Image (cartoon, coloured by chain):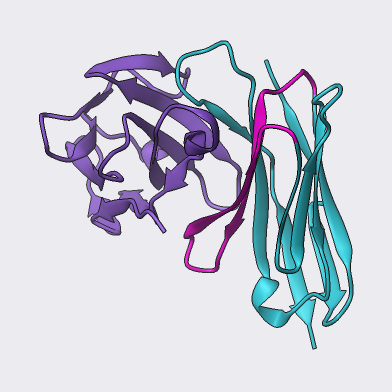
Chain colours: A cyan, B purple
Amino acid sequence: GDQVEQSPSALSLHEGTDSALRCNFTTTMRSVQWFRQNSRGSLISLFYLASGTKENGRLKSAFDSKERRYSTLHIRDAQLEDSGTYFCAAEAGGGSGNKLIFGTGTLLSVKP
Amino acid sequence: GPKVLQIPSHQIIDMGQMVTLNCDPVSNHLYFYWYKQILGQQMEFLVNFYNGKVMEKSKLFKDQFSVERPDGSYFTLKIQPTALEDSAVYFCASSSPGGEAETLYFGSGTRLTVL
């Protein structure tokens, strides 16, 4: 079936540094959504992209508009509150409603 | 932003009992979803629901599972009977069709423990 491969699985950053997460898709996807799950389990939507890039504060996400087979999430000037598990989730389309296929997550730990 | 509410946040039941998980989706949304997350693992799609019907379900959506949304009330996931492997966090989500509005909004989950 359709797969979403997310990397890295874990990431440790010092405050103030930059990094990027990536999701590769085994097939063309219609859209991608990025989430952060906090320690209490709540899932917070960060971005929804059908193409191109979006930026919100220190976060920026891109979805490959040509082949639609990967997406990235860039974190700039990492802060302690950015810690959590980040998931990408993609929709293949052609089905009924927006069935999202989730990646396996990136556990981000930001240290002082 | 838009909020999806899930009640209860935790539920502990004995194997074989019935359980109903409740979801109050975003008010003008038309699509509703349930996802399952076993501790430490990725979220997995269970089912989506539109216009009173199941649109698509995964192999995880066993025969013991059912969903419904009686008019104006909660979108529910019922498991009858429950099994040990049903222990997980169940997330409800909702969305509305069309462009940016297709963003899925998730609730904070119901942690189900089957003993």
Count up the numbered dots: 0
Where A81 falls versus B95 (above or below)?
below
Residue at 45 percent of width and 24 percent of height:
B60
- The image shows residue B35 at horizontal and vertical percentages of 44, 37
Instruction: Answer whether residue A50 is magenta in the image.
Output: yes
Q: Quadrant of the N terminus of chain B?
A: bottom left
**Quadrant of res A18:** bottom right
**Quadrant of res B49:** top left
Where B2 falls versus B54 (above or below)?
below
Residue at 44 percent of width and 46 percent of height:
B105
- The image shows residue B89 at horizontal and vertical percentages of 42, 49
Q: Is residue B46 left or right of residue A64?
A: left
Residue found farthest to the top:
A94
Q: Is residue B69 left or right of residue A11?
A: left
Residue at 27 percent of width and 22 percent of height:
B64
- The image shows residue A95 at horizontal and vertical percentages of 52, 12
Where A84 falls versus B102 (above or below)?
below
Using the image as rendered, state which of residue A103 and residue A15 is in the foreground.
A15
- The image shows residue B30 at horizontal and vertical percentages of 31, 29
Instruction: Answer whether residue B93 is magenta in the image.
Output: no
Using the image as rendered, state which of residue A99 and residue B3 is in the foreground.
B3
- Which segment is the magenta one? A26-51
Residue at 45 percent of width and 21 percent of height:
A97
Where A12 falls versus B84 (above or below)?
below
